[in-house]
Amino acid sequence: MLKLIYTEDNFHLEYLTQSPEEWVVQRVMLAMGIGHVLCVKPSHASFLLPADLPGLEQLRKAINTDERGIISLCLCDRHYVEVTLWGSWVTDDRSEATGIFVTNISDMSHEDCLISPTELLLYNLWLAGQSCASAIQE
C-alpha cells in the first residue's frame, strides 16, 4: 500500500505492506474509541515526479499492464510528469485540504504477496525525485 500524507505545506509518501482496508479499519476503530470525527471516501491524489528520472519507463510499462486503472501518468511539461492514483481519502479536517490518501496499486489477492513491485517502484521514484529536489535547492 502507498500512503500519501498531505499537510498544509508539505507532502510525504510512505510504502507499507499493510492493505488499505486494514489501515482504514484501524483508523476508524481508533477514531470511534476516542470520539473523533473521521471521513473516509473514494478519491484520487496526484503528485509530480521529475520527467528525467531513471525508471519512469518501467513505471509506464507497469501502468499499461494495470487493468484496474488505479494509476495514471501524464506529462506536465518537459521537466515533470504527474502521477495520479485512485484510492481512499481519510481526513478529520472539515476543509479537507489536509489528510491521508491510501491506495493499493497492484492486485494483491494472494495473501502471501506482501510486496507490490509497482508500489515499490513508485516509492523509489518518489525518493529519487526528493533527492533531485534537495540537490537543486542546495
Image (cartoon, rainbow, N blue to C red):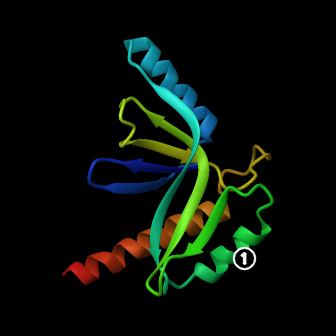
> Quadrant where the C terminus lies?
bottom left
Q: Position of residue 132 (x, y in %)?
A: 35, 80
Residue in view at x 44 percent, y 42 percent = 100
| Image position of 60 (left or right of 43) | right
Outermost residue toward the left in this view: 138
Q: State how many labels appear.
A: 1
| Image position of 54 (left or right of 112) | left
Q: Identify which residue, 36 or 124, lies in the foreground.
A: 36
Q: Secondary structure at mark 1?
A: helix
Q: Position of residue 26 (x, y in %)?
A: 52, 27
Quadrant hosting residue 129: bottom left
Q: Position of residue 95 (x, y in %)?
A: 35, 35
Q: Identify which residue, 106 or 84, lies in the foreground.
A: 84
Residue in view at x 54 percent, y 45 percent = 102
Q: On screen, 106 above or below 64?
A: above
To which residue does mark 1 refer? 61
Q: Position of residue 48 (x, y in %)?
A: 45, 69
Residue in view at x 49 percent, y 83 percent = 51
Residue in view at x 50 percent, y 77 percent = 76
Q: Identify which residue, 64 or 23, lies in the foreground.
A: 64
| Image position of 91 (left or right of 121) | left
Quadrant hosting residue 119: bottom right
Q: On screen, 22 above or below 2?
A: above
Q: Identify which residue, 84 or 116, lies in the foreground.
A: 84
- Classify 10 Å Cα crowding around label 1: few (below 14), some (14-19), many (20 and above): few
| Image position of 80 (left or right of 23) | left
Tell me the kind of residue under disc 1: Lys
